[in-house]
Amino acid sequence: MIVEVSHFLSLLATGLFFLVGSFALLTKPSAYISNLITRTYSHGFLFLIASFSIYVWLAITDNFSVQYIASHSNSQLPTFYKISSIWSAHEGSMFLWIVFLSLWGFIFNITIKNEQILKSNTIGIISLILVGFLLFLLITSNPFQTILPIAPLNGADINPVLQDPALAIHPPTLYLGYVGFVIPFACALSFLINGDPGIKWESLIQKWSVAAWIFLTIGITLGSWWAYYELGWGGYWFWDPVENVALMPWLAATAFIHSLSVSIKSSNLRIWTILLSISVFSLSLFGAFIVRSGIIDSVHSFANDPERGLYLLAFIGIIIVSSMSLFVAKLSIIKPSKTIKRFSKESFISINNIFFGALIFSVMLGVTYPLIYEFLFDQKISVGAPFYNAIFIPMVILACIFMFFSIDSKWSRSLNFHFFIAPISLSVISSIITTLLISYIFDTSNLAILISLFAGFIVVYRYVIEIMNSFFMKKYLNPFSAIAHFALGLLIISISFNSLLSSERALNIKINEFEEYKDLKIFFKDIKVLKNSNHDSIEATFVLENQKGRTFDLSPEKRRYFTRGQITTETAIFIMPLKDIYMTIGDQLDDGSWIVNIQINYLIRWIWFSAGLMAFAGMVLMFSKRNI
Amino acid sequence: MKIVFKFIVLILPLSLIFTFYFLLTNNESYPGADYDVFDIPKFELGSLNNDKTLNESSLDKDFILNVWASWCITCRVEHPYLMSLSKKGIPVVGLNYKDEKEDGLEWIERYGNPYKTILYDYKGTLAMDLGVTGAPETFLIIDGKIVVRYQGEVNELIWNDVFLPVIESKDIF
Amino acid sequence: MNPIRKKRIYSILFVLLFSVSGISLILYSLNSNLDYFFTPTELKKQNIPSDKRIKLGGMVLKGSVEREASEISFVVTDYENSLRVIYDGIVPDLFKEESGVVVLGFYRDDMIYAEEVLAKHDENYMPPNLDIKNDS
């Protein structure tokens, strides 16, 4: 019964959003209308939130007459996982996606006080997008479906791999990021509809875009961390198609934020900014399509259903084609105010846009090419890490070098290099020395890694000098940009070190015996079978000792869940500041020995730390008073 | 120059959308369906609701094999449709998969029994030989050979589109 | 030709040259880094250079798994042709005999030297339609 209330409230919200959309785009703007739009949207949002809250409550109270909850939750689960089970599959996660979308619109709705016409149109566009997604939810993937009269007693057991705190917060964070870009998107469109180049829509949305970017950054980082320790993949990035479709909006969003800052300062690069705002949201939608249409098999893919795929494709197609046509039709109103000076900050950022565009293009190609190839030639292929490495490594190095010089550039003025000869040469020389030292210490001549290290170090050193300058000489430093770019340098260094030093080895080892790997002495102390309420597990205990005589225990596990017979690997990780020791256990051999896999992952935590630092830089901007 | 730019901006997303449209519609419309022909694996299993021991020769020549379990919610959703199939006189054999015996029996008692025979596969050995990845899965067996396999819930739509064409062409049931 | 037009033509040419060379570089690296997917039968028909990474899909032949130290070797078959695979490392949880497997590696001396072994229904990769074909 209660689920019908929830269902009805969603329907009501759909109706209200439809009203808002048609009012905003069909009537003549006036103070009365825009007031009406604001109020009606807020009511629609409240209905939707009420509907979702009831749904969450149904999940917490184990209402298994709702088919979706019965299939994805279990009465034995802790409350936290009962709630997170809502977004563990297609219907519920789509519901959450929509709620987040309307939430962004709502916050925009209540915080923007000026620019009434622009605001009404923006809210109208957001409402129409909401209507499309709500119809998609209610028609093709209804989470409110019931299985009355007889409900199952305990629900289903959810996939044990998914019972994990990182996973419970990873999708919502990512969704908040994806749908947050609806605001720049809708704002750009309503700017085009209004056709008044005097409107400064860019400065209205800067903080929104950065907020969405922060969520996207954190969401991707959490996903990477989860795959590392829970799935036992043992790395930080796998170029899995679904990781790629999350990376594309991130790349576009990063380019967008850069381009936006130019448009705010000088109304230059407006074409880029609008094009990028459309691209970010389109790529987010494209990601939703890839994950939910089942066109690609992946760990993240939801159950496939061609009907859903076609509906989503049609809807996304309409959004993209209409926004692009609007863009093309109104292209003439977005005249650049003046030409861009060579070696000015603007010129560097437009080069940056080209880099990001090329990266997005390459990832898009890597994702779609296997599908097209199979369709045309009936031969299965896949695009793996080698392709992406071949593209990303040179591009990122080049981009770093451009970025290094852009640090000193000024808005609408040419860069005068001889003013900055001292810091530039200082950081270049120290980077060369550092790189040579690393090459000597670790005895490597891997050019790709050494050049990447060099590129990372020049950026890091340059910023260290800048930060010191701002401390001691009171030179102005944009904190957001400094932290974010410093983090990028750190990220590149961490990734380079990780691929230079990390190693893994499969050992076979008998109980009570020693084995050696690198500087580690491994003693196989114990193995036992544990019986738990819903799974059996084999737990091995190893005592490891490094050269300094420091010892620690590692206990990798292998679990077998009863009801579905699912086997999962529980990794054991020992964390040190500079490296992780990562162990998984495999099978037992005929002679009684066990295969264990041991990995030494260098600086892997620094990779996530750098990504987190980037997100932190975004927060600095969010809470700073001025537009940057 | 401007025209070229406009053209590219419009054509690029459009061509992507059309490509995906072709990819989606070109896929077999039912990804769970599979028409590879293979023999029923040899097996020896108990029955869920009596003490008989069954093997591959104790079954009919033509029948529907449905893999289910009491822990499987989709099986619960699918169940009424199986009941209607068995009412129409179509022989459905159940394969109870990785389930506790009491749970399976309770389910049958509670919701009704659409199955002529129910094989009890606690360890999932036959299911493994069949390549079952999860419940429910449904197989059409003609002359001791598996001719249709469907992963997922069988309902009227799936029955009419995936199973019925084969059944009509062989003129059985 | 007036200088403005001349300048414009140069800039168009530059953009064209730049984007064409950029795109062809990307396409070139894409083409040289593809992993082709084969069954043992398909693989034997083709002439694959030994430095080309490929993906092999099939079933693990019953009774073919041998282990020596941390090295594992097994036969992948599509019930027409078979190939032996050698791999140093831990096979995934879902790896077992008579079950689907995908191997990423190099084809040399009629054997596959694997870099990576993925089991069917492994969450990493799911090859479509790799079922037992023992009729005909």
Image: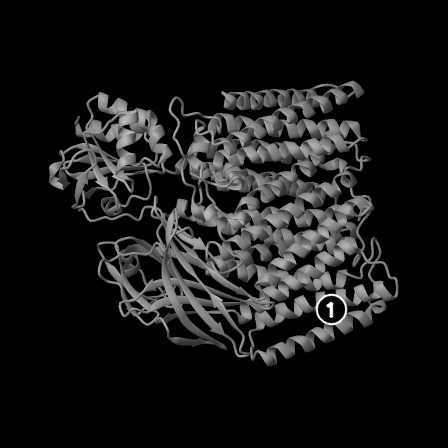
Q: Position of residue B166 (x, y in %)?
A: 23, 31
Q: Is residue B162 visible?
A: yes
Q: Chain of mark 1?
A: A
Q: Is residue C97 left or right of residue A403?
A: left
Q: Which element type, helix, strand or loop, lies under badge 1? A: helix
Q: Is residue A276 left or right of residue A69?
A: right
* Nearer-the-camera pick, A606 or A248: A606
Q: Is residue A325 visible?
A: no
Q: Position of residue A582 (x, y in %)?
A: 49, 64
Q: Is C59 drawn above or below residue A583 in the view shown?
A: above
Count of numbered tags: 1
* Nearer-the-camera pick, A459 or A561: A561
The amino acid type of the residue labelled 1 equals: Tyr
Q: Quadrant of residue A318?
A: top right
List the residue tagged with mark 1: A461
* Nearer-the-camera pick, A577 or A604: A577
Q: Is residue A65 left or right of residue C25?
A: left
Q: Is A544 drawn above or below residue A295 in the view shown?
A: below
